[in-house]
Structures are given as C-alpha cells and as structure tokens.
Image (cartoon, rainbow, N blue to C red):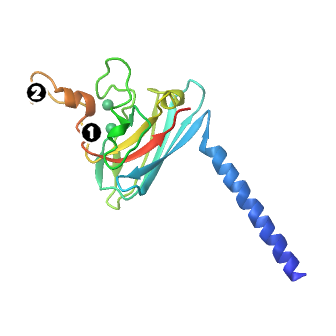
Amino acid sequence: MRLRLLTAFAAAVAACCALAVVGFAQRGDDARSLTVALRDAGGKPVGTVRMTAASARGPIEVRVTARRLKPGFHGFHVHAVGKCERPGFKSAMGHLKAGTQTHGAHDGDMPSLLVKRNGTATLRLTTDRFTLDDLRDRDGSAVMVHAGADNYANVPPRYAPQGPDQETLDTGDSGDRVACGRIAAG
Ligand SMILES: [Cu+2]
Ligand SMILES: [Zn+2]
C-alpha cells in the first residue's frame, strides 16, 4: 500500500514536471515574446534577455538578468545577424539598423547594462525601435554585451571638431564583444 502511494506520488511529480517543461517551452518563444540566452566568449551562460511585445505593433519590453560580468557599464545592443561565433562574436556583424542611421540612433541601440560589484546586472527597458519580427528576420539577430562603456557617439566638438569618426558612428566605442545571445530567424 505504502509502495503504491509512493508510486502514485512519483507519477504525480513526473506529470507536474513535464507540465512545467511544456509551460516553459511555451513561455520561451511565441508571436509576442522570445527569450535569449547570453553566453560569454568561453561558452558559459552569463544571462538571459526576455523580450515581450504588449501588442502586435506596440513597444518591446526588454528584461535582462546577467551574471559573471565585470562591474561597470557595458554597451548593450541588438546586432544584425543571429550568429554568435566564439570567441569574438564578429559573426553577429554591426548594430541592427535601417538606412543611414548612425550610432545612438540605430534601431538596435539600447540603454547600457550596469553590472554591480558582485558581477550581476538587471535591466528593464522598453524600446519601439524594433519589433520581434525585425529580430526574427531572414538572418535573425543577436543581443550583444560589450567589454566597455558606450559613448552613443556623443563626442563634443571640442574633442572632434569634424565630428566623431566612422568607427564611433558605427559602434559607440564600447570595445570587445564579451557576451552574445542568438535570436534565430522566425
Ligand atoms: Cu554592440
Ligand atoms: Zn549602434
């Protein structure tokens, strides 16, 4: 009798876990939301980015939780291609953009990630610069964390009378790519 109860209990637990897994899979990716796993240059998981659209054409809510990163500000962008080839993640190409946009105005530019002294970060932001469909376009896209701070191409004329150079206008000078999360084509 006792054994049968235990068996029933084990079956209930298994069913419950299976449901939880299914639930998670459904939560993971659908028309209104997606989840991105951030991995560092060694392939270790360092965070999660959850993107949710409140409505079909509405702004995207972005929620980031990250760990095992260096304290301080880190440039944080959506890059154009859904390829995170280690170690340098160059395969993700440049920032997600349309036409002649420059850095600070790129579709994929987002507020910087502030990593605390304990190496963790949380960030919650909204953006109306892209839709989930834009992220899941033919070549996908990638969420990128950089090694250093982003200057948003905000370089005062007293430093650069001719204006910032092309590299700054493309990147915001936040340096190496230290973590990447792939968004597959839809
Ligand atoms: Cu970037
Ligand atoms: Zn940019």
- Dot 1 crowding, Cα within 10 Å, few <14, some 14–19, many 20+: many
- Residue 125 higher or lower than 178, as above or below: above
Q: Quadrant of residue 181?
A: top left
Image region (quadrant) for ligand 1? top left
For label 2, count other residues whose C-alpha is less than 10 Å away and answer few (under 14), some (14-19) or many (20+): few
Q: Is residue 180 left or right of residue 36?
A: left
Where the N terminus falls, by quadrant? bottom right
Q: Residue at x 73, y 55 (%)?
A: 19
Q: What is the x, y in percent for residue 186?
A: 56, 32
With respect to residue 39, does 102 lie above or below? above
- Residue 150, label in figure: 1
Labelled pair 1, 2 in contact (Cβ < 8 Å)? no
Q: Can residue 158 be seen from the camera position used here? A: yes
Q: Which residue is the site of mark 2?
A: 160
Distance of label 1 from label 2 (alpha carbons): 17 Å
Residue furthest bottom as drawn:
2
Q: Nearer the viewer, residue 74 or 3?
A: 3
Give the quarter of the image for residue 78.
top left
Q: Amino acid at mark 1?
A: Asp
Residue 150, horizontal then vertical, whole percent: 26, 39
Name which of mark 1 and mark 2 comes first in the sequence: 1
Amino acid, disc 2: Ala
Point 40% across, 55% down: residue: 43
User: Where is residue 139 drawn, in percent x and y?
Assistant: 46, 30
At numbered mark 1, what does the secondary structure look like: helix, strand or loop? loop
Where residue 111 sits, quadrant-wise, is top left
* Residue behind label 1 places its C-beta within 8 angstroms of ligand 1: no
The kind of secondary structure element at disc 2 is loop
Residue 30, image x and y in percent? 62, 37
Q: Is residue 158 above or below residue 8?
A: above
Which residue appears at 40% of the width and 43% of the height? 84
Identified at 52% across, 31% down, the residue is: 136
